[in-house]
Image: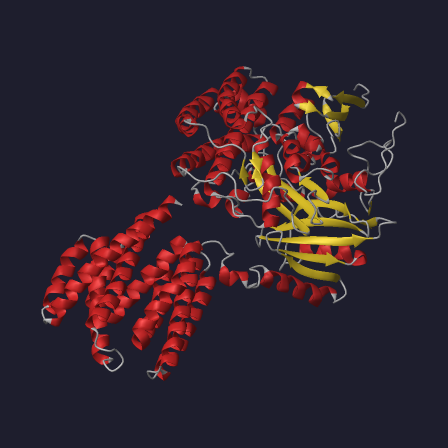
């Protein structure tokens, strides 16, 4: 019997598989992880501090930079919080544009996850397909907002730009195309034995653990909790669409994979209906005062982002800047369970587990 | 805007048409033929839907007028021309209203029943016609919103003066019925309570009007009073209809009267359960936060914060098994920790807050209850300097241990040697 000793292994902060600047300090015994200590904060930009001196509209660009893979939902959570406090009624057309852009963003975000996750665990080609389709979405969002990732599209009371001519048709055409591609994805990856062996039973946790660790989104739904804020606490106009909540029982990376793939389908369903119902005319911005002031008081609202439950807390003293602004960032909460998942795991599973949580470091660090 | 203009034009045209029709019919009626002819006519026309329904209504109205006249001959000086004009005006209105209704019909599918209804109503003569008219008017008003409101009182006054007691009665009945109809149509809406309130109000208004008309003798004062009452009733009906049309949103007029929040019972329940089990001195205050989607908000006393949180999690009647959010705020007079809890069993939210001494910011950690409170408490400690007692690993998660000061404190001064 050989004498073994514990070793410290540093992963990151600049490591391609962490999808940003994220550092893990691992205590390993051979190939077994004894303890994992995440180190975050490399991307902390003090958004909440900066917001104290900014007007509400000026904060919107900052939200783009939190979860930069699904910036539309981030835009929305801020304006939604302000609108909730002001009790604003949003024009229908604006609501539809919001839902369409948010759902496109959700698909794009899941595509990035799908591509990069498989890249992380050794499959190169899915990444190329995923980014091909994502590029189409990015182009559509670029066309409507003028930005590829940082859209700065939503405003308190509506949206900034109306859909250009023919844009809705592009979305309409994209839905069947994407469905077709999705079938190809499943053929390419889902039944692959190597892939299944790498994710089945990996990073497993129970429903109780998921709730205890404040997980949300696909990380929660993979344990059998049927919970989606779009369905269970409907905001915007999500109660007008017929869609299912993707749910799995496994609690492992394999279940999370299926939840996210199913969510792409459900988002396509929503897109299809939204495009059909899209009002042919109407305002895209409610009548709001030039300088937006949230009434005195506080509010916390939460919505469903691709990564889980994103929330926004505003304490206002009635001025045009928030007294205190706080984002509940799903990646930050979801990542907390990582040390627990890694304990006792083989080091080869590290990336498969981390990737399946689907974090964006801009959001983790705030 | 253009839609409303069209409506105005349509109204004018319709008025002219209706005048002619009503005159003709009135004459026919006087000859005693009208009764046999018009139902048949109505049937055909009714099949042609909306426009036809309008005509039928005009006819019915004219009939009603004729009756009224016979009954109230003492009141009206026998100036046939005037009466005819009055009738024509009324008929015109009915038609315009019907047109408006037709438009409304085009816009919403749920109203396919009404043509058939109209037919019946026309056959049922005066009272029923009045009801249909009122319904149509109410609907029209709901469509035109502000504009109609300014117009209708004036119009109502004229008509009411001309019509006197009978009209007031009919309208009162109509108001109640219109509401019922509107209600039926919007059964899909979710604020049934609001509707119920509106309906109740309408009924009350109707009763008041009936009483007013009952008292009425024939003097000018009474007529005026009646006219006012009628006008009011109409306005009320219109308002109610509008409220219903605005529909599915809870912030309609009845709701604007500060109806208790839907979450009030939950808050009451939480407070009751807490006070029964933990005593009365656990909570500092509790309220519904109407800015934050009416979330029940509990403010705990600092010393019983942990105890309360533990109770919220483990009590079977509460069962808040999920910590959705935790953060702190520096309010300058005090610090505050805000936690948003959710119960997946009961599908209910609650906000738990606690006020902390700003000079010695210290509070129990919730990490032992919800593992998800771990990092959020670290973040709160890092940015606000709040110490969480009982936290297993409180460290400066974002800025690092060598950062000077806590940036989200309002008295924070950035320390930078190079500046």
Which color scheme does this rendered protein use?
secondary structure
In the figure, residue A3 lies in which quadrant?
A: top right
Q: Residue at x 50, y 30 (%)?
A: A104
In the figure, residue B24 lies in which quadrant?
A: bottom left
Of the 4 image quadrants, the one containing the C terminus of chain B is top right
Q: Is residue B125 visible?
A: no
Q: Nearer the viewer, residue A41 or A191?
A: A41
In the figure, residue B227 lies in which quadrant?
A: bottom left
Q: Is residue B260 above or below residue B335?
A: below
Q: In this view, does A39 lie above or below A237?
A: above
Q: Which residue is drawn at 88% across and 49% down?
A: B359
Residue occupying the far right of the picture: B417
Q: In this view, does B8 lie above or below A352?
A: below
Q: Nearer the viewer, residue B417 or B235?
A: B235
Q: Where does the image place residue B150, in percent across and percent down from the top left?
A: 43, 59
Q: Where does the image place residue B110, in percent across and percent down from the top left?
A: 32, 52
Q: Is residue B149 above or below residue B332?
A: below
Q: Horizontally, is B59 left or right of B343 in the view? A: left
Q: Which of A30 and B278 is in front in this view?
A: B278
Q: Horizontally, is A246 left or right of B137 in the view? A: right
Q: Nearer the viewer, residue A22 or B33?
A: B33
Q: Can residue B73 be seen in this view?
A: yes
Q: How many marks?
A: 0
Q: Where does the image place residue A71, in percent across and percent down from the top left?
A: 59, 31
Of the 4 image quadrants, the one containing the N terminus of chain B is top left
Q: Residue at x 76, y 24 (%)?
A: A28
Q: Where does the image place residue B196, in percent across and percent down from the top left?
A: 44, 66
């Amino acid at each position: 019997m050989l004498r073994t000793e514990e070793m410290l292994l540093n992963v990151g902060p600049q490591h391609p598989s962490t999808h940003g600047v994220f550092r893990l300090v691992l205590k390993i015994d051979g190939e077994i992880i004894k303890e994992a200590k995440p180190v975050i904060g490399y991307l902390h930009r003090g958004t909440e501090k900066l917001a104290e001196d900014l007007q509400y509209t000026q904060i919107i660009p900052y939200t783009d930079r939190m979860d930069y893979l699904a910036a539309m939902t981030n835009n929305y959570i801020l304006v939604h919080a302000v609108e909730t406090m002001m009790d604003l009624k949003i024009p229908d057309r604006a609501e539809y544009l919001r839902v369409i852009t948010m759902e496109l963003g959700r698909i794009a975000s899941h595509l990035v996850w799908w591509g990069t996750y498989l890249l992380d665990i050794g499959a190169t080609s899915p990444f190329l397909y995923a980014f091909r389709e994502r590029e189409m979405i990015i182009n559509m969002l670029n066309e409507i907002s003028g930005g590829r990732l940082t859209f700065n599209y939503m405003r308190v009371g509506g949206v900034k730009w109306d859909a250009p001519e023919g844009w809705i048709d592009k979305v309409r055409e994209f839905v069947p195309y994407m469905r077709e591609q999705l079938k190809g994805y499943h053929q390419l990856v889902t039944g692959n034995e190597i892939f299944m062996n790498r994710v089945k039973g990996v990073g497993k946790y129970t429903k109780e653990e998921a709730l205890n660790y404040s997980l949300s989104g696909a990380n929660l739904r993979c344990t059998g909790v049927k919970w989606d804020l779009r369905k269970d606490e409907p905001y915007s106009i999500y109660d007008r669409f017929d869609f299912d909540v993707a749910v799995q029982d496994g609690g492992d990376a394999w279940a999370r994979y299926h939840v996210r793939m199913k969510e792409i389908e459900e988002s396509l369903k929503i897109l299809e209906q939204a495009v059909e119902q899209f009002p042919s005319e109407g305002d895209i911005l409610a009548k709001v005062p030039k300088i937006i002031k949230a009434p005195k008081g506080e509010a916390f609202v939460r919505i469903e982002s691709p990564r889980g439950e994103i929330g926004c807390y505003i304490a206002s003293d009635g001025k045009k800047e928030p007294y205190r602004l706080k984002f509940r960032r799903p990646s930050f909460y979801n990542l907390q369970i990582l040390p627990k998942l890694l304990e006792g795991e083989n080091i080869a599973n590290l990336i498969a587990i981390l990737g399946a949580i689907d974090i964006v470091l801009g959001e983790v660090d705030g | 805007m253009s839609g409303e203009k069209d409506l105005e034009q349509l109204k004018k045209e319709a008025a002219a048409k209706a005048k002619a029709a009503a005159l003709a019919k009135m004459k026919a009626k006087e000859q005693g033929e009208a009764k046999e002819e018009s139902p048949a006519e109505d049937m055909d026309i009714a099949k042609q839907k909306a426009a036809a329904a309008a005509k039928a209504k005009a006819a019915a109205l004219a009939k009603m007028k004729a009756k009224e006249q016979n009954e109230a001959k003492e009141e009206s000086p026998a100036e046939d021309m005037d009466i005819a004009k009055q009738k024509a005006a009324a008929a015109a209105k009915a038609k315009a209203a019907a047109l408006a209704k037709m438009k409304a019909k085009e816009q919403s599918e749920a109203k396919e029943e009404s043509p058939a209804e109209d037919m019946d109503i026309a056959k049922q003569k005066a009272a029923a016609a009045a009801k249909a008219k009122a319904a149509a008017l109410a609907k029209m008003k709901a469509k035109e919103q502000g504009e109609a409101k300014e117009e209708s009182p004036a119009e109502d006054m004229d008509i009411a003066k001309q019509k006197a007691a009978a009209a007031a009665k009919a309208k009162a009945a109509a108001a109640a019925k219109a509401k019922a109809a509107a209600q039926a149509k919007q059964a899909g809406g979710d604020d049934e309570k609001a509707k119920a309130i509106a309906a109740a109000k309408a009924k009350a208004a109707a009763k008041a009007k009936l009483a007013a008309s009952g008292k009425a003798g024939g003097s000018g004062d009474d007529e005026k009073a009646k006219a006012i009452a009628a006008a009011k009733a109409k306005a009320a009906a219109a308002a109610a209809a509008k409220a219903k049309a605005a529909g599915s949103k809870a912030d309609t007029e009845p709701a604007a009267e500060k109806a208790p929040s839907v979450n009030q019972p939950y808050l009451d329940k939480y407070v009751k359960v807490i006070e029964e089990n933990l005593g009365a001195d656990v909570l500092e205050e509790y309220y519904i936060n109407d800015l934050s989607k009416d979330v029940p908000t509990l403010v705990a006393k600092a010393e019983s914060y942990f105890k309360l949180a533990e109770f919220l999690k483990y009590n079977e009647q509460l069962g808040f098994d999920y910590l959705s959010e935790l953060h702190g705020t520096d309010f300058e007079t005090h610090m505050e920790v805000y936690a948003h809890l959710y119960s997946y069993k009961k599908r209910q939210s609650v906000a738990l807050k606690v006020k902390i001494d700003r000079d010695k910011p210290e509070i129990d950690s919730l990490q032992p209850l919800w593992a998800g409170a771990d990092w959020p408490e670290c973040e709160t400690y890092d940015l606000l300097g709040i110490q969480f007692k009982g936290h297993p690993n409180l460290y400066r998660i974002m800025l690092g241990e060598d950062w000077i000061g806590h940036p989200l404190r309002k008295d924070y001064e950035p320390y930078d040697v190079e500046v």
